[in-house]
Image: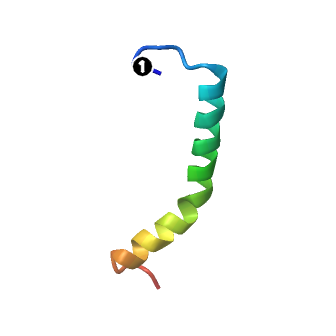
Amino acid sequence: MAIGDTPTKNDQQWLTRLILAHNAEQPELRRLLEYYEGLSR
C-alpha cells in the first residue's frame, strides 16, 4: 500500500487488529511508564 492509496479490505482488517491489540496493551504500558518515571506507588 503506497501513500495515498485506498486501503484494501485486508489492509483494514490488519489495521483494526493491530489497533485493538495496541489498545488492549495500554493499561500495562501506562503502568510500566509510571514505574520507569518513578511515579508508581
Name the residue furthest top.
5
Give residue 9's quadrant in the image: top right
- The reply, left or right, for residue 1 in relation to residue 25 is left
Measuring 58% from the left and 43% from the top, which residue is drawn there?
Answer: 19
Q: Residues within 10 Å of mark 1 (few under 14, many from 20)?
A: few
Who is closer to the viewer here, 17 or 2? 2
Measuring 58% from the left and 35% from the top, which residue is drawn there?
Answer: 15
Q: Which residue is mark 1?
A: 2
Name the residue furthest bottom.
41
- The reply, left or right, for residue 9 in relation to residue 38 is right
Q: Position of residue 32 (x, y in %)?
A: 45, 72
Name the residue furthest left.
37
Q: Position of residue 38 (x, y in %)?
A: 34, 80
Who is closer to the viewer here, 35 or 21? 21
Who is closer to the viewer here, 19 or 31? 19
- The reply, left or right, for residue 23 in relation to residue 32 is right
Which color scheme did the rendering employ for the protein?
A: rainbow
Q: Position of residue 13 (x, y in %)?
A: 66, 32
Q: Is residue 41 above or below residue 11?
A: below
Give residue 18's quadrant in the image: top right
- Mark 1: secondary structure: loop
Q: What is the total number of numbered labels drawn onto the structure image?
A: 1
Measuring 36% from the left and 76% from the top, which residue is drawn there?
Answer: 36
Q: Position of residue 11 (x, y in %)?
A: 59, 27
Measuring 56% from the left and 51% from the top, which residue is drawn there?
Answer: 22
Disc 1 marks a residue whose amino acid type is Ala
